[in-house]
Image (cartoon, grey):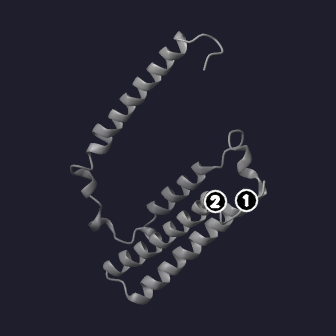
Amino acid sequence: MDFSVTDPVIAAFIVIPVLLVVALVWGTAAAWRRSGASSATAARVSLAVAAAAVAWMAATWATAQAGIFQNWNQNPPPFALLVAAIVALSGTPRFQYFGAERLNVWVTYPPFVWLPAVMVLGALAGHLVIFRALRLQGQTRAPGEL
C-alpha cells in the first residue's frame, strides 16, 4: 500500500507524536529550571530528551516500514522490556534527581486516590455489564444473523 503524508489521517500519525515530543521537551526543560538547575543544564537535558525521542520515533518508523507491525497479533512488540527498563532506570540513585526528601506524596490524597478506588472499579463493573449484555444478545440471535 502506498500512503500520502498529506492525507489527514496519515498526517495525524505524524503530527500528534511530534507535538507530544515538543511537549515532553518543553516539560523537561521547565522541570529542570524549576528544580533550580542552570539554564545550560536544562538545555542540555532537553536536548538529550529530544534526541532520545527522535531516535525512538525513527526506530518506530523503520520498524513499521519493515512490516514488523503487520503481524501484531502473532508477534507483538516486547513492550514489557520497555516497562522493565523504565523501572530499572527509575530505581537507580543516578536517575533519582529530586531525592528521597522530595517524594511525590500528592498521589495519596483525594481526588487522586479515587482513580484506583472508585473509577477503575466503576469501569470494571461497566465492562462486565456490557459483556453480559453482549453474551445474552448473542444467545437470542439466530445463527448467521447480524
Residue placed most toward the observer, 37 or 62: 62
Tell how many labels: 2
Q: Front-most of 116 and 84?
A: 116
Q: Give x and y (percent) for residue 27.
A: 40, 72
Image coordinates of residue 127 in percent, x first then y, are 42, 29
At label 2, which amino acid type do we have? Ile
Rendered image quadrant of residue 65:
bottom right
Look at label 1 and name its amino acid: Phe
- The answer to whether the residue labelled 2 contacts the one labelled 1, judged by CB atoms less than 8 Å apart, is yes
Q: Which residue is mark 2?
A: 10
Report the residue at 51% width, 59% height from top: 86
Q: Secondary structure at mark 1?
A: loop
Which residue is the extreme one toward the left?
110
Gap between marks 2 and 1, in whole Å? 7 Å
Camera-side residue: 24 or 44?
A: 24
Callout 2: 10 Å neighbours few (<14), some, many (20+)? few
Q: Residue 122: percent from the left, percent from the top?
A: 33, 33
Query: In this rendering, would 93 be left or right of 8?
Result: left
The vertical placement of 11 against 114, above or below, is below
- The residue positioned 73% from the left and 63% from the top of the image is 62
Q: Considering only order in the chain, which callout, 1 or 2, is on the residue closer to the N terminus?
A: 1
Please state, as top left, top right, bottom left or bottom right, where the C terminus lies in the image. Answer: top right
Residue at 26% x, 46% y is 113
Which residue is tagged 1? 3
107 displayed left or right of 53:
left
Give left or right: position of 104 versus 140.
left
Question: In the rendered view, does 47 fall on the left or right side of 57?
Answer: left
Position of residue 56 measured from the top left corner of the image (x, y, whole percent):
62, 66
